[in-house]
């Protein structure tokens, strides 16, 4: 069995054929993820014989905990999605294991969706799409706008590239500030208020943790520029929904593009559905059709890295929860 270095996300001596379990075996993702393991040079075996696990179900935590408790030989666990909220307590219960997730896998489609929502909001396409009569001209450029991206991971990196032709002045807020291509400035979490002040577009692309739940409340929404647009492609609980509605009703927000909501799914009859200034997509910034080849490529890459003793991509920090 390989030895893993937890702090570095490294697999031990290789190359060899890693023995990988793919569970739950009956999940709809199991078949193509088993193929991905094989594409990466691994062999799919039962959990009792395996040294690593590709977990296929993004929503189940109890079965994962039971499987890990029964199989201490599972040293590396690959989770399917970037957000690990359902499994975070399991991750923290087994900190000696090496954990990786899908962070960065879905950055390209999600960034594209964020750009679409930002353009739609600035151009007031939300209102035009819901109108049933000819309306007055309205809307602003995205060109040259002040954009603040909250979150500095793969989605932000992709979105910065996509925003390049629009000549926006982009500020990125992230936990560890460091230069990012396409950003005018990158600041720390402690400068969030300053980064929001005067922003024309705010894009949320950060993990949901106990510290970020409710991060965007009425006080912070009041900081943005009059006519600003809020885009959320992260998690609905980052935004206080009642405060969002108030900021739309009374300013300064002119619109919101939401791929995620709180609550989610958004119930039939919820007031957000009827608003002409809110464009809602049902958590489809990354669809199953988009996700399947991207996730398969990540799993195959990490299996190859595991076999070769190289750093694994998408490491999870149990303490941070992402």
Image: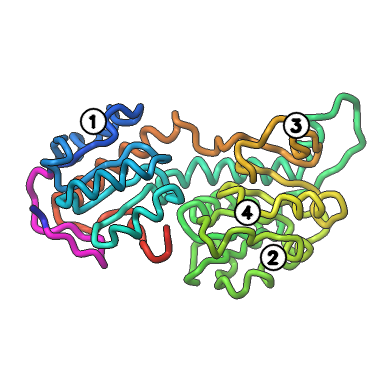
Distance from disc 3 to disc 4, alpha carbons, whole Å, reads 26 Å
Mark 3 or mark 4, which is nearer to you? 3
In the rendered image, which residue does mark 4 sit on?
203
Magenta part of the protein: which range? Answer: 3-18
Residue 154 horizontal side relative to residue 134, left or right: left
The stretch drawn in magenta includes residue 220: no
Marks 3 and 1, Cα distance to the nearest angstrom? 42 Å
Packing grade of label 3 (10 A; few <14, some 14-19, many >=20) is: few
**In the rendered view, how is the structure colored?**
rainbow
Chief secondary structure of the magenta span? loop
Q: Residue 196 carries which label?
A: 2
Q: Earlier in the sequence, mark 1 or mark 2?
A: 1
The residue depicted at 42 percent of the width and 50 percent of the height is 84
**Whole-Å distance between the Cαs marked 1 and 2?**
44 Å
Which badge, 3 or 4, is on the more N-terminal residue? 4
Q: Residue at x 15, y 57 (%)?
A: 309
The percent coordinates of residue 321 (x first, y second) are 42, 59
Q: Nearer the viewer, mark 3 or mark 1?
A: 3
Spatial distance from mark 2 to mark 4, Cα to Cα? Answer: 10 Å
Q: In the image, which disc is placed on residue 269?
A: 3
| Tag shown at residue 35 | 1
| Image location (x, y in percent) of residue 316 | 35, 58
Disc 2 is placed on an element classified as helix
């Amino acid at each position: 069995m390989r030895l893993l270095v937890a702090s570095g996300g490294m697999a031990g001596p290789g190359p060899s054929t890693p023995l990988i379990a793919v569970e739950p075996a009956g999940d709809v993702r199991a078949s193509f993820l088993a193929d991905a393991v094989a594409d990466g040079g691994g062999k799919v075996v039962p959990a009792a014989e395996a040294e690593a696990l590709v977990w296929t179900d993004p929503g189940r935590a109890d079965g994962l905990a039971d499987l890990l408790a029964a199989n201490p030989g599972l040293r590396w666990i690959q989770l399917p999605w970037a957000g690990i909220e359902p499994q975070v307590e399991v991750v923290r219960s087994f900190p000696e294991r090496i954990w990786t997730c899908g962070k960065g896998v879905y950055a390209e489609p999600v960034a594209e969706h964020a750009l679409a929502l930002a353009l739609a909001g600035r151009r007031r396409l939300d209102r035009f799409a819901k109108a049933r009569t000819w309306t007055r001209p309205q809307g602003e450029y995205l060109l040259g706008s002040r954009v603040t991206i909250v979150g500095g991971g793969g989605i932000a990196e992709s979105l910065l590239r996509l925003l390049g032709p629009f000549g926006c002045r982009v500020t990125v807020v992230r936990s560890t500030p460091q230069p990012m291509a396409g950003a005018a400035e990158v600041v720390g979490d402690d400068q969030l208020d300053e980064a929001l002040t005067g922003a024309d577009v705010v894009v949320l692309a950060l993990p949901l943790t106990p510290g970020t739940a409710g991060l965007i409340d009425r006080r912070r929404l009041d900081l943005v520029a009059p006519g600003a647009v809020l885009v959320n492609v992260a998690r609905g609980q980052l935004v206080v929904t009642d405060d969002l509605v108030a900021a739309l009703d009374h300013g300064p927000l002119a619109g919101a593009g939401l791929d995620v909501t709180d609550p989610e799914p958004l119930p039939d009859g919820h007031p957000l559905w009827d608003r002409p200034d809110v464009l809602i997509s049902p958590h489809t910034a990354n669809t199953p059709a988009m996700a399947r080849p991207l996730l398969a490529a990540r799993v195959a890459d990490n299996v190859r890295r595991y076999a070769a003793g190289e750093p694994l991509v998408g490491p999870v920090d149990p303490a941070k929860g992402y």
